[in-house]
């Protein structure tokens, strides 16, 4: 099973600032990586697939990069609605696995 | 618009059974692979199972293999999860999700399963 490790577990950032979240895979997943956002009390929603492609309706302030084992999600200027938990997920090999999540907190 | 509505969750004793349903609307259900993902209270996400668009193949996480069966009825536009021999650590919100490519493109709101004596 491919282990996905996200860092940091919690990130405290002020509104308007930039946030950078990391995700590492225990073995190469090529570009078969997605990012999801989960607001407390809500279902997750897809942000990114293919490691860097924004899903439909996702604002341009969300960007992502990486391949192989190292991936990054960047939110360029945090809005109030962006304070949530973020999960990476590999779909290169079954069982598809998620990272443990990064919680974005207001500083 | 597209909708996924889970139902069937509730309180069940260890060793018991439960069947979850996911009713869909707004899209051509039979065109998509579908999945179940769960989230234990305060924890992260676990992809439990997924099923091909025609129901011919299913995949399971090791943690549920042999205890859980995913199925679908394309005529009823519904997805199911039959859960047997439930354990305390199966307690979670169970989400159904539509698979796009091999990622989870659209999620329902979830149904809570609590396994407790």
Image: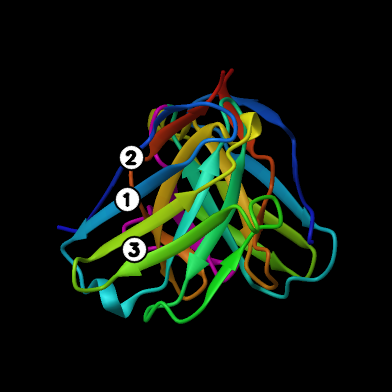
Query: What is the crowding at mark 2: few (fewer than 14 residues within 10 Å), some, or many (at least 20)?
Result: some
Q: Chain of mark 2?
A: B
* Label 2, label 3: how far apart the Cα atoms are: 30 Å
**Where in the figure is residue B16, as x and y percent of width and height?**
52, 36
What residue appears at the point 42 percent right and 32 percent down from the top-left corner?
B112
Residue at 55% across / 54% down in the picture? B68
Whether discs 2 and 1 lie on one chain: the answer is yes
For label 2, the SS is loop
Residue at the disc numbered 2: B8
Q: Quickly name the residue at label 3.
A: A56
Local crowd size for mark 3, using a 10 Å CA cut-off: few (<14), some (14–19), many (≥20): few
Q: Is residue A50 magenta?
A: yes
Q: How far is mark 2 from mark 1, CA to CA?
A: 6 Å
Q: Nearer the viewer, residue A3 or A68?
A: A3
Q: Indicate whether A46 appears above or below A13.
A: below
Residue that label 1 marks = B21
Q: Is residue B3 left or right of residue B98?
A: left
x then y, percent, for residue A80 = 40, 28
The span picked out in magenta is A41-60
């Amino acid at each position: 099973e491919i282990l996905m490790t996200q860092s940091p577990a919690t990130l405290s950032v002020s509104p308007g600032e930039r946030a950078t979240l990391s995700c590492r895979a225990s073995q190469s997943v090529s570009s078969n990586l997605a990012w999801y956002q989960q607001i407390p009390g809500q279902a997750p929603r897809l942000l990114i697939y293919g490691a860097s492609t924004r899903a439909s309706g996702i604002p341009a302030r969300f960007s992502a990069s990486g391949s192989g084992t190292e991936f990054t999600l960047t939110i360029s200027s945090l809005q109030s609605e962006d304070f949530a938990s973020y999960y990476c997920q590999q779909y290169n090999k079954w069982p598809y696995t998620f990272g443990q999540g990064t919680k974005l907190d207001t500083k | 618009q597209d909708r996924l509505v889970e139902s069937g969750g509730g309180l069940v004793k260890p060793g018991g059974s439960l069947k979850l349903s996911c009713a869909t609307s707004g899209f051509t259900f039979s065109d998509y692979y579908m999945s179940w993902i769960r989230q234990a209270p305060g924890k992260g996400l676990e992809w439990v199972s997924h099923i091909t668009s025609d129901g011919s193949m299913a995949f399971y996480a090791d943690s549920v293999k042999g205890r859980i069966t995913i199925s679908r009825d394309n005529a009823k536009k519904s997805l199911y999860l039959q859960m047997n021999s439930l354990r305390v650590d199966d307690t979670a919100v169970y989400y159904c999700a539509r698979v796009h490519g091999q990622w989870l493109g659209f999620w329902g709101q979830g149904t809570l399963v609590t396994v407790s004596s």
